[in-house]
Amino acid sequence: KARASVASLINCSANEIIFTSGGTESINSVIDGSLYDEPRKKLVTSTVEHAAVQDFATAREITGSSVIRIRVNEKGCLDLEKLEDSLKSGVALVSIIWAHNETGILSPVQEIAELCNREGMPLHFDAVQAVGKIPVDVTEVKCDFLSISAHKFHGPKGVGALYIRDGIGWRSRQIGGGQEKSRRAGTEAVPNIIGLGKACEIAKSDMKTNTRKLIALRNEFEKAISKKFDSAVVVGRKVDRLPNTSNICFAGYEAESLIPLLDQLGICVSHGSACSSGSWGPPRVLTEMGYSDSIAKGSLRFSFSKYNEEKE
């Protein structure tokens, strides 16, 4: 039942879903399995991926794989012309983030999928931040792999899923048992999987209502901040992004000083991604978008959920 619920959320068949321990495992498995038989072939990705892609890609470079990293423009959007140029030959996998974990900016997934499908290139979307928050349909946006993590939409931590399109060639590297139709060995975390399935059901039924609420909260928040602080720069304000994410840079300030003060007031924010916690340099995604260090060092990410209210 849980497998069917996950499949229903992204519009695929239940037999195309395998359960994992979360987004990182799903992402690593796709890259590793795609390069397993063709280690010298290329991985195409972007310069603003989550650490699960960035760091794993770097590790594969050390073992001989070639990695092509496509840059983004000043709006944080992928350079589609450069992507198209990279798809000529020798590519084992294209892996692109659907919604950015720090800025909320959405990639042009339809255009990316059309390019890859036309060239016959295997495509993976890291949809960890997108699934459960905005509509994700693998029939409409045709990809071969898609990664999901339950705790990003109020499911349990420590469980996720990987969509593998039926008929796609891919070799699992997790060996030792026949679980998940021999695609992911190891005893399944059944309670967590049930939690993931239920979270998918709730997300699907509540998505339209939650989206309207979160966009209104986010926009009102950004309007108030911009009015109060002349130095505030809202990242991605003029492009498509997630309804729940607000990344604001406070020019001339440093997140390292702001976060403890806000924490004392019971306001939970972050600088950069959760996976780079403790790093106070300018976030990579902002420097790639052309923000100066003095602005990027003052970036704070505010995340909203359906449980937040306007008074907060």
Image (cartoon, rainbow, N blue to C red):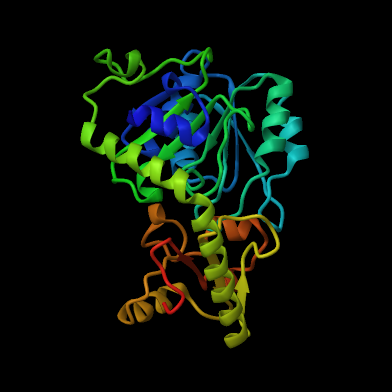
Where residue 180 sits in the image (x, y, percent)?
32, 19
Q: Quadrant where the C terminus lies? A: bottom left
The residue shown at (71%, 26%) is 87
Query: Which of the 4 quarters of the picture holds residue 6?
Result: top left
Query: Which of the 4 quarters of the picture holds residue 230?
Result: bottom right
Instruction: Work out whether 168 lies above or below 228.
Output: above
Instruction: Work out whether 271 lies above or below 232.
Output: above
* Residue 166 appears in the rendering: yes
Where residue 24 sits in the image (x, y, percent)?
39, 38
Nearer to me, 245 or 290: 245
Q: Quadrant where the N terminus lies? A: top left
Left or right relative to 131: residue 86: right
The residue shown at (71%, 53%) is 73
The residue shown at (48%, 22%) is 13
Left or right relative to 130: residue 234: right
Query: Which of the 4 quarters of the picture holds residue 177?
Result: top left
Q: How many numbered marks have been drawn onto this rendered protein structure?
A: 0
The residue shown at (73%, 29%) is 115
Instruction: Work out whether 267 lies above or below 85.
Output: below
Where residue 116 sits in the image (x, y, percent)?
68, 27
Where residue 80 sits in the image (x, y, percent)?
74, 40
Nearer to me, 298 or 244: 244
* Residue 63 appears in the rendering: no
Left or right relative to 205: residue 74: right
